[in-house]
Image: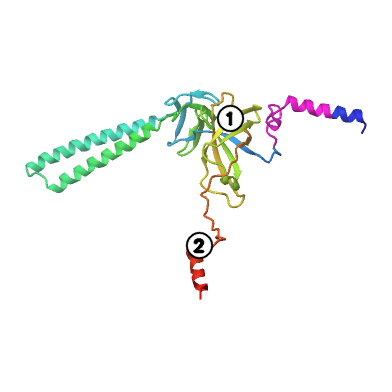
Amino acid sequence: MSRRLRASVGFLLMSLALINPEGSFGKSSGIQSSDLNAVRGVVKPSEEAVISSELQARVKRMPFRDGQAFKKGNLLVEFDCEKYWAELAAAQAELEAREKTALNNQELAKLNGIGQLEVDVSESEVKQAKAAVRSANVAVRHCKITAPFSGRVAKTLVHPHESVNPYDEVMSVLNDKNFEIELILPSTSLRWVTQNSPFKFFIDETQELYEAVVLEIGARVDPVSQTIRVFGEFKEQPQDVLAGMSGSARFMDRKLKSKTPKPTFKPSTSPSPSTASATMNSSRP
């Protein structure tokens, strides 16, 4: 290689270093996957749920579609529940009839017209009718599903006018305001990683670098892969990040956890005064 060519290559490398001073943390390249100090991670919502049906019914209305935002308490799914409303009305009418029969039997018992057994049976029938009303009320309450938290619809699994059975999944929702970062670290990281340990997280999709801290450390080490799950949170919740995005994290401060120093035994090289005097006394005639 000629001297002029070597000079050109050196100037090119110096220019690249000046353009990207942070090395593998640069905006264009991110944290390189070959970097041994970086670990992969994924962005996850702090809250997510797959909503299921509790009834056998037809879907009447679904106000929100995939990707749309909703508030806590908004209606997500409404079922056609004419059957269940009719069952509730029938149960309430049955309860009313049983209560009237029990009241009449109590009056007859006071006049010695019937025995105590008939009174007890009628009161038990009232309790049974009340239980039927409660069961019908539960079914009616499941005719509408409201949002358990504010967020967005991740995926709708059914459509209006379709019929569903109990425990069929109808919608997946998530909280898009608070995100967590799930990392898989080697189990040897437990020597230095702690809660609130800072790290930098580079997201591949946005090509941006974010400041984060460790929120929780997993309770169990995977004995096969010798890894542990670590959960972090952004110091400031980003606006352009979506659940499912992935990236690389690097922990800059890897100080080992402080341990209580063990006492060490150091033998003395000079005899103690009592030992020296005892030796001198024994050497005298």
Q: Position of residue 36 (x, y in %)?
A: 68, 41
Which segment is the magenta one? 10-32
Q: Nearer the viewer, residue 177 or 228?
A: 228
Q: Nearer the viewer, residue 270 or 7?
A: 270
Q: Nearer the viewer, residue 248 or 144?
A: 248
Q: Quadrant of the N terminus?
A: top right
Colour scheme used in the picture? rainbow
Classify residue 73 by image quadrant.
top left
Who comes first in sequence, dot 2 or dot 1? 1
Residue denoted by label 1 = 211
Q: Position of residue 176 (x, y in %)?
A: 52, 28
Tag 1: residue type?
A: Glu
Provide the secondary structure element on which disc 2 rests: loop
Instruction: Assess whether residue 283 is covered by the magenta stretch.
Output: no
Question: Looking at the image, do the residues carrying marks 2 and 1 touch, with CB atoms under 8 Å apart?
Answer: no
Q: How busy is the neighbourhood of tag 2: few (under 14 within 10 Å), some, or many (20 plus)?
A: few
> Furthest-left residue in view?
111
Tag 2: residue type?
A: Ser
Above or below, 151 against 260 in this view is above
Above or below, 148 against 277 in this view is above
Residue denoted by label 2 = 272
Q: How busy is the neighbourhood of tag 1: few (under 14 within 10 Å), some, or many (20 plus)?
A: some
Provide the secondary structure element on which disc 1 rests: strand
Q: Position of residue 85 (x, y in %)?
A: 35, 30
Q: Residue at x 55, y 37 (%)?
A: 197
Above or below, 188 against 138 in this view is below
Could you give the CA–CA distance between mark 2 and mark 1, rounded to whole angstroms? 60 Å
Q: Residue at x 33, y 38 (%)?
A: 135
* Residue 140 falls left or right of residue 233: left
Instruction: Assess whether residue 29 is covered by the magenta stretch.
Output: yes
